């Protein structure tokens, strides 16, 4: 809990960028300024904090940014912040600038670092879930997930068009090193025949049998969506295995890559970011600290940093069963 009145709040974005981060920065800054609290932007996440890349923000700094992808504060992953010496430098910069609270936008790496940092140094802090992977506990959705999924869906729909024109099997690899939510949601939305995610064991023989069954049924167009972190090895390993078993098939692989991180945030992500940013500052000023703010069942909730990272979001088993039924 905060022990004194917050007068200066530092805002940073850390880890991988996610569409909607700018809308969150805007909401944080404007809510704090509304309450008469000074706002300081920290460029390049924890690394910028260590190096003192800090500037005071006003309302014009966050004007006309909520529709933009990326983050005006830049972002980075900091190896130095993982060391006690790096965290000591970061705290010294906060003291030098008179910053007495922090608002952090990021994912599991951001909050893992935060949990360690705030165990070592006493400063109020609150986090916003900013990650396209949707892999944090304590919130139904994370900033950037909806946009990333819609980007993937748009791309897969276009791939299906060309697949149908050439009677091809396409393997589409989407982001998700440790979490398969983008693959799961985009695959369902695009009617994929198979969806491979890190949370489940890949039964390659069952996939090959399904392809053989489709061949006998004269089904010539297939889409397989695979998360980059799937245990089988992603799109390239799957492509090799399928072509080895079915050399007569025209099989192609496409990796969507960083296109999923870019672009204007969706309406859902803009609204989510605005709600979380507003709620974060309101809570911080009332003494709530060392937690991530999220939304569950359309209600604002707070989850300790360590718990948000440790528990992760759970895959819905009903959705996995549904895929088997709908693709049969």
Image (spheres, rainbow, N blue to C red):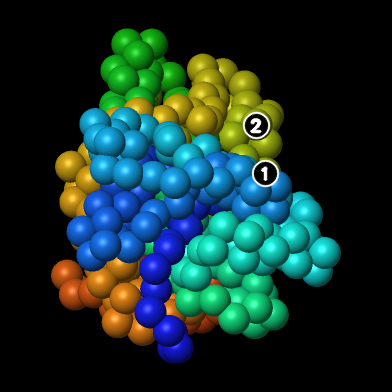
- Residue on which the image places disc 2: 236
Relative image position of residue 96 (x, y in whole percent): 63, 60
Q: Quadrant of the N terminus?
A: bottom left
Q: Is residue 312 visible?
A: no
Most extreme residue toward the top, as rendered?
Answer: 165
Q: Nearer the viewer, residue 253 or 313?
A: 313
Residue 276 appears left or right of 178: left
Question: Which residue is pictured at 74% across the width and 60% down the height?
Answer: 89
- Between the residue at mark 2 and the residue at mark 1, the CA separation in whole angstroms equals 7 Å
Q: Is residue 132 visible?
A: yes
Question: Which residue is pictured at 43% across the width and 84% down the height?
Answer: 4
Near mark 1 (Cα within 10 A), the count class, few <14, some 14-19 or many ≥20, is: few
Question: Which residue is pictured at 31% across the width and 67% down the height?
Answer: 281
Residue 148 appears left or right of 11: left
Where on the picture, by quarter, is residue 84?
Answer: bottom right
Mark 2 in CB contact with mark 1 (< 8 angstroms): yes
Q: Secondary structure at mark 2?
A: helix
- Disc number for residue 233: 1
Question: Which residue is pictured at 38% across the width and 11% down the height?
Answer: 166
Q: Secondary structure at mark 1?
A: loop
């Amino acid at each position: 809990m905060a022990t004194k009145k917050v007068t200066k709040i530092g805002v940073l974005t850390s880890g991988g960028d996610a569409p909607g981060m700018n809308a969150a920065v805007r909401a944080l800054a404007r809510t704090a300024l509304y309450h008469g609290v000074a706002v300081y932007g920290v460029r390049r996440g924890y690394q910028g904090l260590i190096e003192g890349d800090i500037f005071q923000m006003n309302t014009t700094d966050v004007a006309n940014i909520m529709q933009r992808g990326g983050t005006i504060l830049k972002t980075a992953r900091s190896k130095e912040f993982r060391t006690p010496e790096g965290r000591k430098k970061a705290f010294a910069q906060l003291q030098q600038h008179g910053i007495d609270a922090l608002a952090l936008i990021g994912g599991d790496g951001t909050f893992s670092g935060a949990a360690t940092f705030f165990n070592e140094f006493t400063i109020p802090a609150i986090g916003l879930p900013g990650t396209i992977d949707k892999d944090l506990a304590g919130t139904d959705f994370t900033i950037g997930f909806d946009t990333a999924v819609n980007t993937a869906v748009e791309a897969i729909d276009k791939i299906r068009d060309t697949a149908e024109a050439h009677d091809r099997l396409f393997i589409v690899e989407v982001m998700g090193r440790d979490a398969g939510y983008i693959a799961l949601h985009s695959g369902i939305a695009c009617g994929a025949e198979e969806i491979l995610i890190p949370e489940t064991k890949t039964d390659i023989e069952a996939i090959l049998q399904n392809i053989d069954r489709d061949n006998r049924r004269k089904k010539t167009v297939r889409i397989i969506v695979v998360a980059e972190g799937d245990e089988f090895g992603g799109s390239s390993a799957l492509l090799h295995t399928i072509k080895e078993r079915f050399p007569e098939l025209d099989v192609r692989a496409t990796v969507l890559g960083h296109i999923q991180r870019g672009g204007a945030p969706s309406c859902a992500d803009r609204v989510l970011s605005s709600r979380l940013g507003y709620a974060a500052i309101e809570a911080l000023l009332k003494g709530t600290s060392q937690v991530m703010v999220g939304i569950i069942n359309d209600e604002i909730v707070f989850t300790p940093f360590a718990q948000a990272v440790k528990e992760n979001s759970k895959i819905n088993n009903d959705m996995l069963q549904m895929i088997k039924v709908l693709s049969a």
